[in-house]
Image (cartoon, helix red, strand yellow):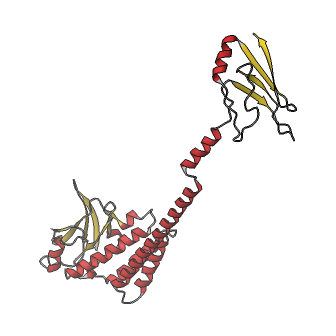
Amino acid sequence: MFAEYKRDVSHNYLILHGDETINTTSYQVRILTGNTMSSILKCRMQGLDGTWFFYYDITSKQSLASFYEQRKLQGEDLEMILKGFLHVIEEMAEFLLNTEQLVLCPEYIFLDVEKKEVSFCCLPDYHHPVQEQFRELTEYLLPKLDHEDPTAVNLGYGIYRKAMEPGMQLENIKELLYRSENSKEKIAESDTKIRDKEEYVEEMEEPPQFFQEEKKEKKDRKWQPAAGCAVGGSVPAGNSHFPLSGIFSGNSNRNCIGGGNTPDGSWSRMDLDGRKKEEKTGTVCRMEKQSTAGTCRNEYRKT
């Protein structure tokens, strides 16, 4: 078999031809050039000096060999190739084509990366047992596996072991693909559960917003003296009284109501009307509460 590549204005072609004489009116040639199978590259024939050439349209496609020359083969990539192989074998069986005419060389298997499709070449004068070709293909793929991907490793070596067995059936490949897909689903479910659990733990560690607002509100709530009253003092050890000194605006005859703590810990309300009245007369009441006597002494000072 001979191969060459050709390019025109809008298409790229892989051109294959063999040494044998081809019957251009045969059933297989008519099916092949009729482009009725989606897994086979679109093909047309052209004769020159008694030799027939098969032109396969490879526009927007890359060969398996060139695409994975510098890339590692992931599990999903291997699944795509194997599913493409199963598809082409089933299509050829449906159209009663000889599977030994399928070309499984990595250089002549083409990938559509965007559509994730695999396309093959079928050559009428090509005769190689498909199982032998498949075994050689698996041997080619093994070194290109991404050995950090468990799906690729398990599926790749599993397929290789099956390919080495005599009388390999397509059901063996389907079974391995089925196991691989189930394994990926279980891993995905496990990852989802772990992720949900981590999110739940993060939500539990973070207090609800209304607790944070309530805490902030309590923190901002400080004791403030009643209007017109400035108080300063300290609590000596062992003394239950509060020695306080400050300036109170109120009636000159009025004592400080609630000179100590009320039961709720707050200070009693001051008489604002009296404050306004004494502000007019210019009188300031200075009250000092002694810790021993516990009484109020009023001093008046004219300003």
Q: Position of residue 84 (x, y in %)?
A: 32, 73
> In front here: 195 or 174?
195
Is residue 126 at all visible to an observer of this figure? no
Above or below for 136 versus 110: below
Residue, far left: 25
Above or below for 262 versus 183: above
Left or right of residue 245: residue 124: left
Above or below for 295 versus 158: above
Q: Quadrant of residue 55?
A: bottom left
Quadrant of the rendering where the C terminus is positioned:
top right
Is residue 292 at all visible to an observer of this figure? yes
- Residue that appears at 81% across and 25% down: 288
- Residue that appears at 76% across and 35% down: 260
Q: Position of residue 215 (x, y in %)?
A: 61, 45
Q: Position of residue 188 (x, y in %)?
A: 46, 68
- Residue that appears at 64% across and 23% down: 272
Q: Quadrant of residue 290?
A: top right
Residue, far top: 303
Left or right of residue 190: residue 96: left
Quadrant of the rendering where the N terminus is positioned:
bottom left
Residue, far bottom: 166
Q: Position of residue 210 (x, y in %)?
A: 54, 48
